[in-house]
Amino acid sequence: MRYLKLGGLLMLLASLSACGYLFGDKGVFRDSAGDYREAKDMPPISLPSGTSTDQLVDIYPIPQIESDPQFVDSDKVPRPAPLVSASADQLVRIQKLGDDTWALVAIAPGQLWPQLRSFLSAANIDIARMDARAGIIESTYLVLEEDPRPTRFQFRVERGVQRGNSELHVLQMFQTSAGEAWPAQSDDFFLESEMLRGVAQYVANSADTAPVSMMAEQSISAGGKVSLGDDEQGGFIVLELPFDRAWASTARSLDISGFEITDRNRSEGRYYLLYVGDKEEESSSWFAWLGDDEEHPAEGVPLILDVETQAPERMVLRLSFEDTGKSLTREQIDALLVLIKGNIN
């Protein structure tokens, strides 16, 4: 019996030492869960001259942290931003501004990309060129029932204005002897519109089973084209759109957000506003805590929203109040900016 007990003790000690060898801090199968704390930045891979680096991308890129100007000068505990989104009411919407038409889709580009490919496969449309990193698919020439002339289409997936949204643009051209360069606008807007509506309807019908393309997800940012920032002048909204579209999108957002546009000057990029809010629903005043209990802090304060052009596709929206004896705090201005930002599409 003593021999058996001693043997059992030796086996126990051996197993414990083996566990230390296999699973300890220096073991073969050590726990590496905390290694990220000691991770260091490494220099980029150095390749010989003439070698392309297009295929070298981060597998898990870290998105930029959006600057939020709210409560910068306040000692109060920040409260959550309102859950507003201009595209939350339906999955797919056709948008039009001038001659430009596109589909606004309430899913990320990485989800829209495989659905676009599935549509082309289901419609028996052959692909001539595909670039997931640029979000572009070009079809071969095909003959449609609507027009006997050979035609082809270019499909372009872009990030939407709001985070997690996408935009789908379609470009059409007829076969010509002048060359294969894509025109700036479609040769036939009717064919462009019909193709866009067909893809939009397919996406709306199959959204529940949409897979995700990791290549498109990594290459086409899902962060949106609208963000908040601040500088010495105060908070502002950054909108990565051309002026015409930014001007129209801002007007729609102001209307949804409860502002009355009393006047506007498009050449100067200026809106004159009054905040009226939603008089029917008391609960809609999500930031009533910024002022008195009975009166909204922005009520009766004439406001000005300037749309400043910093680049061809970069607008900055700044909100201020007119000097009429009534004023708003930085905190209240920032809260209104958050409301406007959430309803821009």
Image: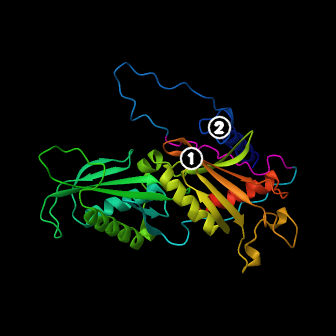
Residue 61 belongs to the span the image colors magenta:
yes
Percent coordinates x, y for residue 44 in the rendering: 51, 26
Q: Is residue 220 above or below residue 259?
A: above
- Under mark 1, the amino acid is Met
Q: Are marks 1 and 2 in contact (CB under 8 Å)?
A: no
Percent coordinates x, y for residue 114 in the rendering: 37, 58
Could you say which quadrant of the image residue 303 lies in? bottom right
Residue for point 71% across, 71% down:
277
Left or right placement of residue 118 versus residue 228 in this view: left
Query: Which residues lie in the magenta part?
Result: 59-74
- Label 1: how many Cα within 10 Å (few below 14, some 14–19, many 20+): many
Percent coordinates x, y for residue 191 in the rendering: 25, 64
Decide whether the magenta segment is chiefly helix, strand or loop.
Answer: loop
Percent coordinates x, y for residue 187 in the rendering: 23, 56
Q: Is residue 306 above or below residue 57?
A: below
Q: Which mark is residue 36?
A: 2
Kindly identify which residue carries mark 1: 315
Q: Mark 1 or 2 closer to N-term?
A: 2
Residue 13 belongs to the span the image colors magenta:
no
Residue for point 76% across, 46% down:
2
Residue for point 46% across, 63% down:
105
Q: Is residue 270 above or below residue 84?
A: above
Could you say which quadrant of the image residue 62 lies in? top right
Helix, strand or loop at mark 1: strand
Helix, strand or loop at mark 2: helix
Residue for point 46% across, 50% down:
217
Q: Which mark is residue 108?
A: none
- Label 2: how many Cα within 10 Å (few below 14, some 14–19, many 20+): few
- Under mark 2, the amino acid is Tyr
